[in-house]
Image (cartoon, helix red, strand yellow):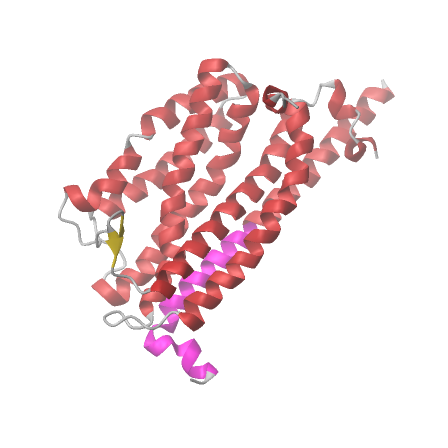
Amino acid sequence: MSWAEFFAMNGYGFYVWGSYGVTLLIFIIEIALVRHKRKITLQQLRLMRDAGEAQ
Amino acid sequence: MAINWFKYAAPATFYGLAGKMVPWFAVPAAILFVVGMYIGFFVAPADAVQSEAYRIIFIHVPASILSMFIYLIMAGYAAFGLIFNTRLSSMMATALAPTGALFAFISLWTGALWGKPMWGAWWVWDARLTSELILLFLYLGFIALQSSIDDSRRADRAGALLAIVGSVNVPIIYFSVKWWNTLHQGSTIKFTGTSMHIAMQQAMFVMLVACWLYVIAVTLVRVRSIILERERNAQWVSELNEVKL
């Protein structure tokens, strides 16, 4: 079986890869979001601390 | 040596523990995804009736199972937090909701992409599909309700009530293919055995474990941020190395 045949999935390529592609995209976005949220939360804590010290 | 498990129920201790646990779930999840996809696409044969399109089940079935399972865990944590007033359990419920919603979405999305070539329709108002859609709305309702209330303890309690009441929907999803005459097929894997090819079962099982490990890893990262946010005035937070910088 060639790679072209493999990706064609016997005519169901759009449905099969559409399923796995979107799932992969969702996982990548979710991982990016939780990491971003951690970064933002830590930044806010530092800002809060600096504001407290300035007083 | 006796381990004091209650120690880990304290947000301060759990924060550190969760941080150490993340790679132990994330790395095996990544490996198992690759293994599961390999078995699913290169070892498992094409289906006699559905040809190659059936390969969608290796993500559809695990995502669907987990969307229901995560909901029950979330409702369990929320109920525990409501009854015993334990802060960490409520934070876990909050951390699980977005991932649960995403899995419900993946279940519906992959189901639609399977339904189009197999049934000729992206969507039908069948009992299984409709109750899964309600599950997605329950997750979104839980998230929206909690984020609309400023006081986090009140948000926990309101969310917990919604989560507990909504959990009635989970057995409805599960038994819908038995109770009603649905277009959605019944379970292929039953407690009494299955007619499924062994490689298909292996691929589905490996993908289920991979997804579950992924859920744990991503939830632990999310709950750590929630802990920091809610405990921001606590002494231990200001003493963390990552905050001291």
Identify whether A32 is placed above or below A54.
below
Whether residue B178 is visible here, answered yes or no, is yes
- The magenta segment is A3-29
Q: Is any part of residue B151 visible from this angle?
A: no
- Image quadrant of residue B243? top right
Q: Is residue B147 left or right of residue B72?
A: right
Residue drawn at 59 percent across, 37 percent down: B220
Is residue B18 part of the magenta span, yes or no? no
Q: Residue furthest front?
A: B1
Of residues B67 and B130, the one nearer the viewer is B67
Quadrant in the rendering for residue B1? top right
Compared to residue B77, the image places residue A17 above or below, namely below
Tell me: B118 left or right of A41.
left
In this rendering, the answer to whether B91 lies above or below B31 is: above
Count every numbered label the image shows and give the total. Answer: 0
Question: Quadrant of the image for the C terminus of chain B?
Answer: top right
Q: Position of residue B187 (x, y in %)?
A: 25, 51
The x and y percentages for residue B135 are 34, 39
Q: Position of residue A49 (x, y in %)?
A: 79, 25
Furthest residue toward bottom: A2
Residue at x 55% of width, y 39% of height: B219
Image location of residue B74, percent across then percent down: 44, 31
- For the view shown, which residue lies furthest in the left direction? B181
Give above or below for B40 relative to B63. Answer: below
Report the residue at 59% width, 33% height from top.
B223
